[in-house]
Image (cartoon, coloured by chain):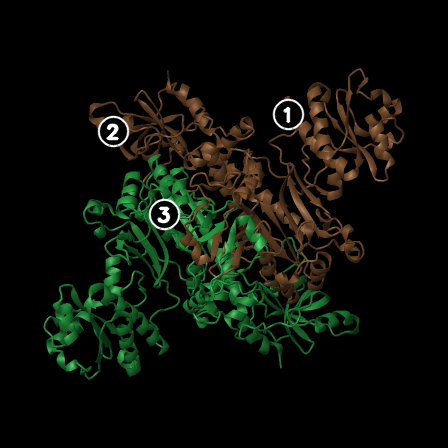
Chain colours: A green, B brown
Amino acid sequence: MHLGAWLGPLCRGLRRPVGRTPQLVRGALSRRLVLSSRRRIPEFNSFVSRTNTCGELRSSHLGQEVTLCGWIQYRRQNIFLVLRDFHGLVQVIIPQDESSASVKKILCEAPLESVVKVSGTVISRPPGQENPTMPTGEIEIKVKTAELLNACKKLPFEMKDFVKKTEALRLQYRYLDLRSSQMQYNLRLRSEVVMKMREYLCNLHGFVDIETPTLFKRTPGGAKEFLVPSREPGKFYSLPQSPQQFKQLLMVGGLDRYFQVARCYRDEGSKPDRQPEFTQIDIEMSFVDQMGVQSLIEGLLHYSWPSDKDPVVTPFPSMTFAEALSSYGTDKPDTRFGMKIVDVSNVFRKTEIRFLQDALSKPQGTAKAICVPEGVKHIKRKDIESIKQFAADQFNQEVLPIFLKASRNWNSPVAKLVTEDQRLELIRLMEIQEEDVVLLTAGEHKKTCSLLGKLRLQCADLLETKGMVLRDPAQFSFLWVVDFPLFLPKEESPTELESAHHPFTAPHPSDLHLLYTEPEKVRSQHYDLVLNGSEIGGGSIRIHDAQLQQYILATLLKEDVKLLSHLLQALDHGAPPHGGIALGLDRLMCLITGAPSIRDVIAFPKSFRGHDLMSSAPDSVPVEELRPYHIQVSWPTEAEAQKDSLNQPHQQES
Amino acid sequence: MHLGAWLGPLCRGLRRPVGRTPQLVRGALSRRLVLSSRRRIPEFNSFVSRTNTCGELRSSHLGQEVTLCGWIQYRRQNIFLVLRDFHGLVQVIIPQDESSASVKKILCEAPLESVVKVSGTVISRPPGQENPTMPTGEIEIKVKTAELLNACKKLPFEMKDFVKKTEALRLQYRYLDLRSSQMQYNLRLRSEVVMKMREYLCNLHGFVDIETPTLFKRTPGGAKEFLVPSREPGKFYSLPQSPQQFKQLLMVGGLDRYFQVARCYRDEGSKPDRQPEFTQIDIEMSFVDQMGVQSLIEGLLHYSWPSDKDPVVTPFPSMTFAEALSSYGTDKPDTRFGMKIVDVSNVFRKTEIRFLQDALSKPQGTAKAICVPEGVKHIKRKDIESIKQFAADQFNQEVLPIFLKASRNWNSPVAKLVTEDQRLELIRLMEIQEEDVVLLTAGEHKKTCSLLGKLRLQCADLLETKGMVLRDPAQFSFLWVVDFPLFLPKEESPTELESAHHPFTAPHPSDLHLLYTEPEKVRSQHYDLVLNGSEIGGGSIRIHDAQLQQYILATLLKEDVKLLSHLLQALDHGAPPHGGIALGLDRLMCLITGAPSIRDVIAFPKSFRGHDLMSSAPDSVPVEELRPYHIQVSWPTEAEAQKDSLNQPHQQES
């Protein structure tokens, strides 16, 4: 069997990402490596003992004496081996002559994944034995000397991308998992994207990279902030959820254009796909308005976008919060596909369908629907059952499915109750095609929209499992969502208000007068950036007027302003108008790489329960090490411990 | 009085840094601003409502309609005002005609430090009224419209660089202090230097910027690590002092060339000029040796060095630890000046000076001296007294001063005991000049060197207060210190060993055999980078052999290897040889800017007691917020509290 025959799949294996669109990303990956090395050509071999990386050798290197360092990826019949480094694979010929016995011994006896250094000559492969699927497939290395740098002991799993590992095992042996082509790709791309963002901000637009403290004062109501005991009895720092206060103070300090790739902390216990520490691209500017921040971010993403993806098209479309809710049932619409929510109240003003009648008889009652394309083919009875169940359980709502068969016969339990006029009007309003299914619900505006928003995504999932492509993974649909409400009723006490985002958000200038009369109606100057249905950023124009800030904090939100006195004072001491934004870097990179979880774009992530499975953090600490911090552990009673464990999700560490 | 007359000093005032070499830095600062804007020309006016910055306007802008935003720095007789932004100052003419009454009112009534937006025309100043000391001194703005963006309330201190503030006041109102030209310069230069470092590492040499967690597991003996309680009873994260373990694991993971501008944490209570959180340029490479890391760092500093300073000359000189100790009495010699320690034991083998006799009669006894140039002129009797007192108090050592008068008569209490031969030999050996003073001591090698090392610096301080220039502040003397011992005797138990740096440091290859026989004699592959007598970085080649690491941890250091089992295992799974370094960014920027404290190169530093004086962190936390973390405060008894307060330095917050 010839080498090319098994190196081909091996090489493809190495380069196959495990993300959600392997077939699309694979081609793009090798294209990208070429493009990016053309763009910058960093010198990978400076300061080290190798002359070349394994992945860079080509026919143009023929005849060159090279020294390579890498891991033994594969060996066959003591004749060939494949050496791997971060840059790629290269085929090495093990010398068979007597005089090279020691070299042969080293290369044949070293276990796979051992680290070796080899020197030799780049030669071309015998005719017909080239491997066109391998970037180094035209050449091989005729080895002269070899050195075993470190032998590898038995591994906990096979180091092949196609060998499936549980995520717990991958996290426990993260240093092995990092050798996978997918993790190498993700982390290197992350570094590149951030570097380009820095170039854009610093070098092109005069932003100043400023580090702000992470040992800070607890913010009012900061229930998600980790505490850090200090050596003063009873005094604690806290790890802030964002540099919000600091970046505003920098504006007051005349720093004008600030950014930071900021580590932030949020203690949310066990939320899936969240991390206790995360990173945001944190930006703040003086003398800017909402459009200014949006243009900056559009330019930033355009500039830093990976070159193997289609370029980002700017400006991004914009949608009000109200429109997002009524058309998509969410404040983060996935605009890659249609199936928008349509208000069909007027169609059913006169109807015999009971739940529609009931809903529309109420003052705020509406009837809404979404149209699932080709649903007749793909949505089965059991799907309908689970949709209805979901609507009843989560929203206490009824859903009526209407199957539109090619015969134009409406197939639905209540279809006979829909008049011909209603049918035609529905078809016109919703642009219904043959074979579509309409899901109809009725009730209060927000609730019906939220329900249909969820059903829209569930049906898209369903259709995609059947082979339809609704959400092209190569497509990146950015969207600004704007005009959020400034306040929301408090969940636990709906007559009181809380900030929809944070209390420093400026009200919309057109709604200023409402602050003193109907504050719940005031829109804010907050904006969210949504990508393919995920919120990847948010920001606002801030309040720069101390009096207004005081009124909102004290009078409307009933906060203890003493805790923020430094900020209020700063606003009174010549604060410029300012605004900013923060992009969630982990989420953004997750979407760009198509990774299944943000853990795949973080070098050493925590499990969903906040554990580092490699080092087993958090860990116990001897009592004497707690003493300098004047704290002791309050061990829960057995009853409490039991209660706690019931509240914890009973899942294995993923 | 003409405007130029008072604008001149004002402008110089704005640009005068408060660092230790105002006269040198001042010229450099304006030169740098020109150079750096030529180099990159970032666009400062994108996305905002101004057309120009205050500082950028020149004669070339004459006739242009401009819109500026800035702070009112100064106003005179309601005729002129000076507008300031981060970029500089510009003179604005307040319109006096009737039709501009509203503009005049705004500009005349707004308190200083209010934020305004003005639009108008760039005109040239009347002949003879130009201000050559002001970059915008050839032009002024004829205002057409003005808008008060935010009025400034009464300030806690005057916003002028020459008004001296206590550091406590500066920290309490940090957002005001940040408006000073010195803080603007420091923070902007820091951002620029770091950006250039990133370009060098990422774009030129293929390093990958990887973020590592700060919520980690407590390291063995990590007494300086802050704790972070988790929601699991008795389990704590800790904030690591460096990403050491992670960066080594990245090498095992094949990431090959890692760097990070890493936030690190160290709880050292109240140490002056230390911060509980600090930043290091953290670097690790595979397949590298000591020379490789050193060349990388030399290239890095050369590339990122501010353009207003003399270029960094590479390679840096190198000195062994032993040599640094014997010539400078420290492992971080300031090589900008001489006054090296000289061993004069052989001169005094036969002497009647009692303490020399005593010392040299012992097997390890030595006599050492430094020569203070022109000391006769500058060192007074009271200086000698305090030198002797210091030597006695801190080192239990005697010091003999010998004044070498022009008459060649040795003036010293014991001079008559020094023979003519000894005199001549001393002069030859130490290259003594007329008017020099020799400080002589004797005893054990390390102790005498350490003492003379301190005296060398004290005398340099003394001579500089008298006007001599020993340490040119424009000079940057880099030095590698190498060949440190791998282990040191434990202070509390000198028969046991502890790591001189950290337990992952590789032994010097030539000393490997000594590990098993005389480990205290083994040198390490650790290297320190010293700049002008301050340690600004340190690193090492690491151990990549699991067996060796296990032997050092368990057998030599008696550490609990279970806590590091993940690292030992990683070394066994194909760890490449690797090494790295970390540069202390705060200290480096402090030296580059000539700032008196690292607090001057950090936007929001803590006081020396670890307090944020602006927000008053750390702070009390309600008991119910401690509950989720299963901790409670152990309030000290009155007696304990008293004892604690005695151990605290009784200084005011600086």
Give percent across and percent down for residue B465. 62, 23
Mark 1 or mark 2, earlier in chain: 2
Considering every residue shown, the one lying at the far left of the view is A350
| Residue A538 appears left or right of B467 | left
Q: Which residue is mark 1?
A: B464
Q: In the picture shown, does residue A110 fall above or below A245?
A: below
Give percent across and percent down for residue B470. 66, 28
Crowdedness near tag 3: few (<14), some (14–19) or many (≥20) residues, C-alpha within 10 Å: many
Q: Write down the quadrant of residue B318 in the picture.
A: top right
Residue type (three-letter) at the residue carrying disc 2: Val
The label nearer to you, 3 versus 2, is: 3
Residue A309 vs residue A174, the one in the foreground: A174
The label nearer to you, 1 versus 3, is: 1
Give me the disc on residue A309. Answer: none
Residue type (three-letter) at the residue carrying disc 3: Gly
Q: Quadrant of the N terminus of chain B?
A: top left
Give the distance between the C-alpha atoms of the residues marked 1 and 2, in whole angstroms.
54 Å
The label nearer to you, 1 versus 2, is: 1
Q: Which residue is mark 3?
A: A580
Q: Which residue is mark 2?
A: B103
Which residue shows up at 15% across the image and 73% down it? A356
Give percent across and percent down for residue A260. 45, 48
SS under mark 1: helix
Q: In the picture shown, does residue B371 fall above or below B325?
A: above
Discs 1 and 2 lie in a common subunit = yes
